[in-house]
Amino acid sequence: MNMRNMEQRESTQRMGMKYLSNYERTNYSDGDILILDNMGTLSTQGSFETEMVLIVICEHGILHLDHNGTPITVKEKDMLICPPGVYLDNIVSSPDFKAVIFALSYQKFLKTVCSGMEIWSLLLYATRHPVFHLLDIDLDITAGYFLVVRKKLQTDKTYYYREIMHSLMEAIFYELCVVMNREIAPERKAEEGNQGNTIFKKFIELVAMNGGKERSVNYYAQELCITPKYLSSVTKALSGKPALEWILGYTTDGIAHELKYSGKSIKELANEFRFPTISSFGKFVKKRLGVSPREYRQGKQ
C-alpha cells in the first residue's frame, strides 16, 4: 500500500477522508465521499482511528486486522463496516486480496444519510459486529451500482457531477444497510419519539468526540441541556444500555487500545484518561478488562 508513514508508530493516526485520498488508486474523492475501486494488497503495523464511515467489500482473498483490539478476518464476499471512532491495527492481507472501498465523511453522513434512528442503530451495531456476509444478489446489486459509478467517472465533470456522485454513493450505502439489517436480530427495542432519537445521536457524538475521557453522565446531560435521569432513560430505551455503560465502553476501548499499541506509561495513561490516581486507574482497568494495566499490556488478558 503506497501511503505515507505506514511504518510502525507509537501514536494513533487519524484515518480521515484526506488521509485515504493519498492512496494512489483513489478513483474519486471530494472531501465528502471517496471511492477506491481496486484496493490491492495491504500490510501495515500502523495504528489508526477512523474519522468517517468506512466500508470495505472484499472481492478476493483475505484481510486480517485488529478492530478495537479484537482480531477479525474479512473473507471473499464479506463486507467490513467501520463507523467513526473505530481503532484499526495490524492490517495485513493475502497476496490475492482485492476490494472495493468507499467512505462517507462524518459530516456528510450526519447531513444526508443519518436522517433517522434506524440507520444510526445499524452503525452502532457495526461498532461491535463489523463484518457482514453478502449474498450473490447483494453482490449483483452493488456491482450494478459500481458499474454506473465507473462509467460516470469516465465522463466530463460538468454540471451536477458532484451531486450525481453523491446520490449514487448514498444509494449504495442504503443498499448495504439492507444487508446489515438482515443480520441483526429482529427483536428491536421500541423507539422513543424524534426528540429521543436526536438526543441519543448527539449523546453518542459527544462521547465519541471525547473518547470516554469524561465519565460523568451529568457532564453530557448538561451539554445536552437535559437532566441526567432523562438522558439515561432515553439511552436505555433506544439502545438497551444505560448512558453510563456507553460512556465507560468508550473509555475501556480507548484504554485497551493505548495499553496494547502505544508506548505511553501507566502514569501517562492515567493522566490522559483523567483518573485522580494510578491506583484508581488500575482498579478501573482490572474491573473492566479483568487484569491489571501491566498484565493487559503483556497480553495476559
Image: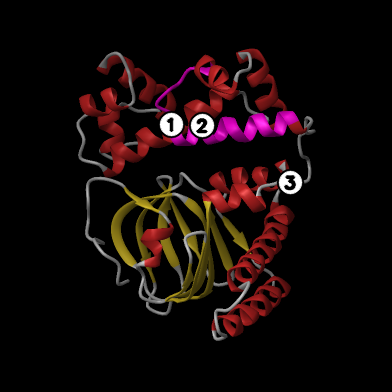
| Residue located 69% across and 20% down the image | 233
Residue 39 x %, y %? 44, 74
Magenta part of the chain? 195-217
Task: Mark 2 or mark 3: name the one nearer the start of the chain.
Answer: 3
Residue topped by disc 1: 210
Mark 3 surroundings within 10 Å by alpha-carbon count, few (fewer than 14), some (14 through 19), many (20 or more)? few
Task: Mark 1 or mark 3: name the one nearer the start of the chain.
Answer: 3
Q: Is residue 192 left or right of residue 269?
A: right
Say which amino acid is labelled 3.
Ala
Query: Is residue 239 in view from this perspective?
Result: no
Say which amino acid is labelled 2.
Leu
Vertical placement of 257 versus 133: above or below?
above
| Residue located 78% across and 33% down the image | 191
Q: CA distance from mark 1 to mark 3?
A: 30 Å
Number of the front mark, 1 or 3: 1
Q: Which mark is residue 185?
A: 3
Vertical placement of 68 versus 240: above or below?
below
Q: Are marks 2 and 1 in contact (CB under 8 Å)?
A: yes
Coloration of the structure image: secondary structure
Say which amino acid is labelled 1.
Asn
Residue nearer the viewer, 111 or 264: 111
Mark 2 surroundings within 10 Å by alpha-carbon count, few (fewer than 14), some (14 through 19), many (20 or more)? some
Residue topped by disc 2: 206
| Residue located 64% across and 78% down the image | 143
* Residue 74 shown in magenta: no
| Residue located 43% across and 58% down the image | 17
Main SS class of the magenta portion in the image: helix
Q: Quadrant of residue 150?
A: bottom right
Q: CA distance from mark 2 to mark 3?
A: 27 Å
